[in-house]
Structures are given as structure tokens and as C-alpha cells.
Amino acid sequence: MIDTVLFDMGGTLEDIYTDDESRAASAEGVLRILRRHGIDLERPLPDMIRELDEGWNRYAAYRGPTNRELKPEEIWGNYVLTGFGLDFDTVKPFAEELAHMWEITYYHRSLRPGVREMLSGLKGLGMKLGVISNTASLYQVFRILEEYGIRDYFQDVTLSSVTGYRKPDPNIFWVSLNQVRSDPSTCAYVGDTFSRDVIGPQQVGFGVTFHIHSFLTASRDKEVPKDVRATYTIQEIGEVYTILKELTQEAMPAAK
């Protein structure tokens, strides 16, 4: 019987996408933060966008094979901004400022319709709830959950930036499971990528996995084997509550 539901953040609880506008805004945000801290790069915006892309590609080459997440000062000081001649010690004092700005600017984010109602329904079923998110910021997920007004629904929020492990690495799931005190067999996981949110929980032994499509799905799942399947494929986030309510009712002993 499922008694715990853990969620991915971007693409699952949130609708999320990036475009030319957000890429330009995030590059401008980097320039603005650097100027505030006495560093004026004087780069044309197209060059800035290109060089930041190259920096993130350097970091992706590290984290992709390892499923490890570094701290913001390491990401920005050792990878993203090295092409500008900046280093760890220079960037460290304001690295989280950069990381937070990037997460909320590079991506357009909004709470999926029906999330609050779904979470309220799951709480009504007695479910423990949590979030497991890959993120390069230490605090952004906590703060945006507060802004959405849904932070209090969750008993645990586990982040790759804090644990040092990225989904689908088993360790990030085990950290969350230990914090919510649940056995994986009684847990459901809800996410928008097969590569992270289906394969990861299944390897750990989650009882149920849900997959919901997002803007990120195709780009994250290019190399996923075709035989990887979630327990349930859903179109709307509210289906998580509907399905788990039915499973809960089926698991209850019939009245005599």
C-alpha cells in the first residue's frame, strides 16, 4: 500500500520552459550581479550567451557521467565562468546569488494547474509528501515552494545541491526516504523524465512511478531504452490523487 508520494520539481509540480527571451534575461542577470560585485565584463549580449552556454557544457561534461552535483561556488567558479577569467575564490562570495538568479530566470516557471488541490487530496488520504529535485541552487526550490504557497504540504525537500547526488543516483532517493522514514516499496514517485524520475526510483524499489510530459522530457530522455516504462503515464497532475485514492480504497479491507 502506498503511503508516501515524492515529487520532482521543475517539469512536474511546475510547468517549465526556456526560450530566447529567458536565455537573454539570464545572461543579463549574470552581468548585473557581476557588476554589483565590482566585475564589469563588457561583453556583447550574444557573446555572453554563447560563453555561458559553453561554461554550462563544461559542467555538464563533468556531472553527466558522475550524477554528482557540486556546490554553487564550484559550478560557477570552476566551470561556468572560467571562460571569462574568473575563478573559485572570486565567485564564491556571490555564487548562490548567481545560482538562484539563474534557476528562476533561465527557465520560465509556473505552478501546474491543479497542484494545490492534488496535494490537499493526498494529505487527506494520509500520505507523506516530499520533493526530490536536481538543482544547482542551494535555496531556490525552498523559496519558490513558499512563493507558490505549497511548502507546508511537504515533510521533506531533498536537493542535489545539498546531497551532492543527482537523480537517478540512488543516494539522493535514499536520503529522502530516510528523512520521510518510508520504505521504497510503499512510495510513489512523480516526475517528467524517464532518465531521472522513472529509472531512478525503480532502481531503488519504489512501489509506483508516475510519468507526466513536460518541455524538458524530450531533451532529457534521448538515450533512454525504449523498454523503460512508468507504472502510470498521466496527462494531468490531478490524476496522481485519483489513482492513489483508488489504490488506497482497493487495499482497504472490505467492511463486514
Image (cartoon, rainbow, N blue to C red):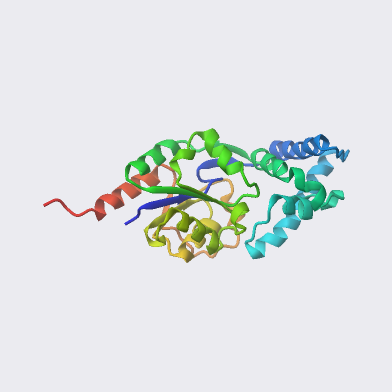
Looking at the image, residue 254 sits to the left or right of residue 61; the answer is left
Q: Position of residue 123 (x, y in %)?
A: 36, 42
Residue at image coords 78%, 55%: 78
Q: Position of residue 211 (x, y in %)?
A: 47, 52
Residue at image coords 48%, 66%: 203
Front-most of 6 and 60?
6
Above or below, comparing residue 171 to residue 51 in the picture: below
Find the residue positioned furthest to the left. 256
Q: Position of residue 17 (x, y in %)?
A: 61, 42
Location of residue 166 by image quarter? bottom right
Looking at the image, residue 27 sits to the left or right of residue 243; the answer is right
Front-most of 227 and 107?
107
Front-most of 223 and 172?
172
Above or below, comparing residue 22 to residue 213 in the picture: above
Quarter of the image containing the N terminus?
bottom left
Q: Position of residue 102 (x, y in %)?
A: 69, 42
Looking at the image, residue 25 sits to the left or right of residue 5; the answer is right
Location of residue 168 by image quarter? bottom right
Residue at image coords 81%, 51%: 89
Looking at the image, residue 63 sits to the left or right of residue 148; the answer is right
Q: Please give the count of numbered marks on the rendered protein.
A: 0
